[in-house]
Every structure is written in structure tokens, then in C-alpha cells.
Amino acid sequence: MRNKEIGKKQKYTMSSMLHRLIAVILVPMSIVIAILIGILCWYSFQYRTILSNVTSASAFNQNFKDDIDLKMFYYVSDSAYADGMPIEEVENARKLAEQLLEHTTEKDSIDSIESVRDLCITLEKRMEEIDNVSSYDERMIQLENNIYILTDLIQTYMYDYLYYEAVHLSEFQTEIAKQVEYIVFSVIVLIIFVTISIITYVAKMTDTITSPLTKLTGRVEDITRGDFNAKEPVEAAEIEIQKLSDGFEDMAGKLSSLIDENKRAERRKRHAELELLQAQINPHFLYNTLDTIIWLIEADKKQESINMVSALSDFFRFCLSRGKDIISLQEEEKHVLSYLAIQKIRYQDRMDYEVKIPESLYPYSIPKLTLQPLVENSIYHGIKLQREKGKIVVEAVDMDDKIELIVRDNGAGMTEERLKEMNHAIETGEKIGFGLRTVHERMQLLFGEEYGLTISSTEGVGTTITAVIPKQKQNEKVII
């Protein structure tokens, strides 16, 4: 009878101790976790605010100055392309500045965005002043002395704001990293405390429990290292441990299947994204081409307008390529020739071109839309930026088991710093040089990392872009 009382007392005492242990563990944990959550929420809010500022500022039109200057020139010169004063664009820039000002805390950033806002207001006034001047010479003087200077300042201050916010974001990230170290240390101390408390009670468990648990722990470590192959479950006398082991093996098998399916899905997704990128045609190219056709028709240049319409038709026909992603080098040559013919008519005496692809290489395959982005880059970042007449040379060289495609121009070229940035961006996939990066990424996805683009350039001399692809015919399987 006394033993039963002692047993009941001990059971009760054990239960009481267990409750006290739970209280000792949960209360400090709850306080620490609440503090950590509060700190993380505060830092998260600050980080999102700065990131939101940078994101919103990035939405600012990078061509703001060029667009405003051009529209105002058309308006002042009473050009046929005039579409009224660009009040709405300036108003949008002012509203963006006011929106950013509400959430900006750094002094340098505030000064920059306030300058953007004030300059936008001043720009609107100067635009209205031009509208009240009837003399053409006086309007052009005001355009030069007021509008062009103000748009340049607005764009400069907006870039300054982006720079200061980016610096602030970097500093804030460093501060967060330090706080994370403190948080990790606190969590480690808490884990040690909880572990010691649990070990004190777990020591009373029998070997029949610890042995299967040890084996199960080893299996968990195998899974952590990536061993998802299903194995024989750990044999245990306890139903709970047996169910746990069975569940781990079942989970490992399902995880293996899910990982394989996810890899296939990611590859399909990547292909789909590349197909989408291939299908994208620069709308500005189409607008400019159609404007040139209209100009040729108005200038009564019937044959040139017919040639340009024909070239544009060929260009889009080759873009479609009957839905094929891989085409012959001959088809790619026709496509780039149609594109160059269009650009030749547009730029007339400012550009010449030469395409030298041996007929012996015609049957070999190439990803559709490989050469055109390279030629486009040479035109817009090389030939267009210089006053002298430029020339683009496209050629293919047989390299035994490879084909080397070269697009060379004698345009403006690049500085060493800019060249390093471009090559680094192509290799790392950064958001710069989008057309070139896309071509490089697609070639490596299709053929392997040994293939892709390389760029060499000298400022004032020109740029050479080299693309290397495997020498494969269309009926051969593409290596992925």
C-alpha cells in the first residue's frame, strides 16, 4: 500500500518535473523567439523599404533625356513627327520623385530625389515658356539653354539617387549580416540548453530504443548527403520508431522521384523560356522600319520602298522558320542578310556590310536567331555611335569539329572597363547586354559550356564578337 502511494507520488512528481522542465524550456524560448522575430521584422521592413525605393527608381525611363529632348525638338521645329509637348512624361517623373521622397530616409538620397522633383517642376515651366514664344530662333535658344540642360540634370540626379540608395542597401545588408551572427549565437546557446535538458532524461531510455534511433540517425545523415535510394527500414521493437523508419524510406523514394521530375521540369521550363526569348522581336526595330518605309514612299522612292518591304517580309519569314528552333546556317545567313538589307536602307551611306559564309558550311545547323542579335549589337553600339561610315563583316570559319562565327565592325568600340563588364556579364548571366547574354546562354544550354560567345574590342577601332558552335548537321541529335 505504501509502495503504491510512493509510486503515485513519484509519478506525480515526475509529471510535475516534466511540466516545470517544459516551462523552463518554453518560456525562455518564447521570449527569445519573440525578440528575434521582432528584430527580423524590423530589419525586413527597412530592407524592403530601401529595396522598394531602388526598384521604383529603376522604373525611371533610362532614355528620359533623349525622349524629352527629341519630342521637344520636334515640337519647337514644328516637325511632322511632333506629337505635342511631353508634359505627361515629365509629370510622371515628378510623381515618381514625390513617391520615392515619402519613403527615403538617407540625406544624400533625399537631396537627389528632391532635386529631381524640383527640376521636373522647373522643366514644366520652361516648356510652357517655350510655348509662349513665337520666334523660332528664340524657341531654339530656350530649347538649348533650358530644356536640354534640365533633362540632363534630372537624369543625372535620378542616377545619383539610385547610387546612394544602392550604397545604403549594401551597408544595411552588412549590418543585417552582423545581427544574423548574434542571432545564430543566441540560437546555438538555446539549442545547447535544450539539448542538455533532453539528454538528462533520454539517458534513462533503454538500449532497445537507442540502438534503432542511432541507425535511423545514420539514415537521416545519408538522406541529408543526398542518398535518396530506398533501403530496408530499420528493425525496431517499438511501433513508433518502426513507423518513423518506414516513413523515412518512403519519403526518400518520393523525394528521389520529385527531384528527378523537378530537374526535367526545370529543363523544360528553361527551353520554354528560351523559345519565348527567340520569339521576341524588338518593337522599336519594327517601328523604325515602318517609319523608313513611309518616308521612302513619301519621297517617291518606289523601288527602295518595295525592296525594304520585301526584306522585312523575308526577315519575319525566317524568324518563324516553320516553328523550328534549330535551322541550317544557310537559312540563318538569309535571315541576317534580310536584316542587314533593312538596316542598310535605313542608314544608307552610314553603313556597309559583307557576309562571307562558305557554301560548304550551309548544311550545318545553328540555333535560330544567333547572328541577328550580334549584328544588331554591332549596329546600335558600334556603327551608330560614330560619324564616319562603318562596316559590318559577318563570316564563318570551318574549325574541323567546330564552326566559328565572327561578327566584326569598325565602330566606336569599347573601353577596357566596359569590355570586362560585358564579358563578365555574359559569363555570369547578369542583366547587361541582354541580347548577347541570351545567345551565349542558349548556346551553352544546347551544346555545353565549351561553346558560346567571346568579345574583343578596342575603343575607336571596333568590336569583334565570336560565336563557337559544334559542327553538326540538322539530322544529327543536338547535344544537351
Image (tube, rainbow, N blue to C red):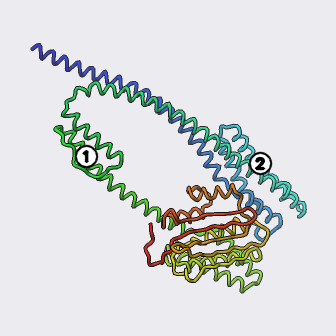
In the image, what residue occupies the spot 50% across and 30% down? 182
Residue 55 visible in the shown view: yes
Rendered-image quadrant of the C terminus: bottom left
- Considering every residue shown, the one lying at the far bottom of the view is 303
Vertical arrangement, residue 238 with respect to residue 423, above or below: above
User: Residue under circle 2?
Assistant: 119
Report the amino acid beneath label 2.
Leu
Assign a secondary structure to mark 2.
Answer: helix
Label 2: how many residues lie within 10 Å, few (<14), some (14-19) or many (20+)? many
Locate residue 355, reporting x and y percent.
65, 78
Residue on which the image places disc 1 = 247
Q: Amino acid at mark 1?
A: Gly
Lateral position of residue 14 relative to residue 142, left or right: left
Q: Are marks 1 and 2 in contact (CB under 8 Å)?
A: no
- Secondary structure at badge 1 equals helix
In this orientation, which residue lies closer to the viewer: 255 or 301? 255
Say which mark, if any, is on residue 418: none
Q: Residue at 62%, 49% (x, y): give it.
A: 56
Circle 1 crowding by C-alpha within 10 Å: few under 14, some 14–19, many from 20: few
Place of residue 150 in the rendered image (x, y in percent of width and height, measured from the top left): 79, 52
* Cα gap from disc 1 to disc 2, whole angstroms: 66 Å
Q: Is residue 442 visible?
A: no
Task: Locate residue 218: give its quadrant.
Answer: top left
Q: Please identify the residue farthest to the top as the structure is shown.
A: 2
Quadrant where the N terminus lies? top left
Residue 82 horizontal/vertical position (percent): 77, 67
